[in-house]
């Protein structure tokens, strides 16, 4: 009888040990799988931010060129300077928009799927969240220029630009005082946009230093 009890207990212990080992192996496998997934996410985020930085650097360069054109042209508008008409040919580059669309698919996927919890380093998690929040602030500064383009510059060009006169070699812009005021506002908005872009680049550099 005692021998049978000991045998049964032994069998139970073997089963318990087996189950424990199986659970441990499954847990190790899951942890390894989670770590692999986390590293893939972090690598994708790094690649996304590298692309973002490159785009922001291009935008910053474009903004700098536009500010340079405005600094050259603005003093001539609403004056009788003979160089005014020839210099105005450069102004059209200022009318183009330099938009930024963050590559945040990886980050949004992590948030929406709940996989952001895989990053167990609190400081790293905070840095990533702050970086993508910085984009939102940066894009708010971009909106200033978009508003001026849509609500003021576009309307001015429709109401006051005479393209037929320009083709005849004439200046072609009436109400020069208003035109100059709008372009000065554009210049100020470009400066704000450039400063925001530089902050975005700096944020990219900071997080890339950590991710590398």
Image (cartoon, rainbow, N blue to C red):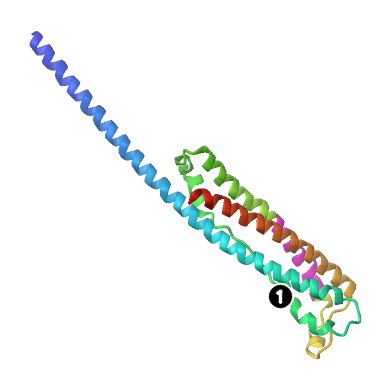
State left or right for residue 114 relative to residue 135: left
Regarding mark 1 in the picture, which secondary structure is present there? helix
Residue drawn at x 76%, y 62% is 189
State left or right for residue 63 relative to residue 165: left
Residue drawn at x 58%, y 54% is 204
Residue 39 horizontal/vertical position (percent)? 42, 48
Residue found at the far bottom of this picture = 168
The answer to whether residue 172 is seen in the rendering is no
Q: Name the dominant secondary structure of the magenta segment.
A: helix
Residue 137 horizontal/vertical position (percent)? 67, 51
The quarter holding residue 25 reads top left
The quarter holding residue 81 reads bottom right
Pick the residue in front: 58 or 15: 58
Q: Which residues are magenta?
A: 141-157
Residue found at the far right of this picture = 80
The vertical placement of 10 against 182, above or below, is above
């Amino acid at each position: 009888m005692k021998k049978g009890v000991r045998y049964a207990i032994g069998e139970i212990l073997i089963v318990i040990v087996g189950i424990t080992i199986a659970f441990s192996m499954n847990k190790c496998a899951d942890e390894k799988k989670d770590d692999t997934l986390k590293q893939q996410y972090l690598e994708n985020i790094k690649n996304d931010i590298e692309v973002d930085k490159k785009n922001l650097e291009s935008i910053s360069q474009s903004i700098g060129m536009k500010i340079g054109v405005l600094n050259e042209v603005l003093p001539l508008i609403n004056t009788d300077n003979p160089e005014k008409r020839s210099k105005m040919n450069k102004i059209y580059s200022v009318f183009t928009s330099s938009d930024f669309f963050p590559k945040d698919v990886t980050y949004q996927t992590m948030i929406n799927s709940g996989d952001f919890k895989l990053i167990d380093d609190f400081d790293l998690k905070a840095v990533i969240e702050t970086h993508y929040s910085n984009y939102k602030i940066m894009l708010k500064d971009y909106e200033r220029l978009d508003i001026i383009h849509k609500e003021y510059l576009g309307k001015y060009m429709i109401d006051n630009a005479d393209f037929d006169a320009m083709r005849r070699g004439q200046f072609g812009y009436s109400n020069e005082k208003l035109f100059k005021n709008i372009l000065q506002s554009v210049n100020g908005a470009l400066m704000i946009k450039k400063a925001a872009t530089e902050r975005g680049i700096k944020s990219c550099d900071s997080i890339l230093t950590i991710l590398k």
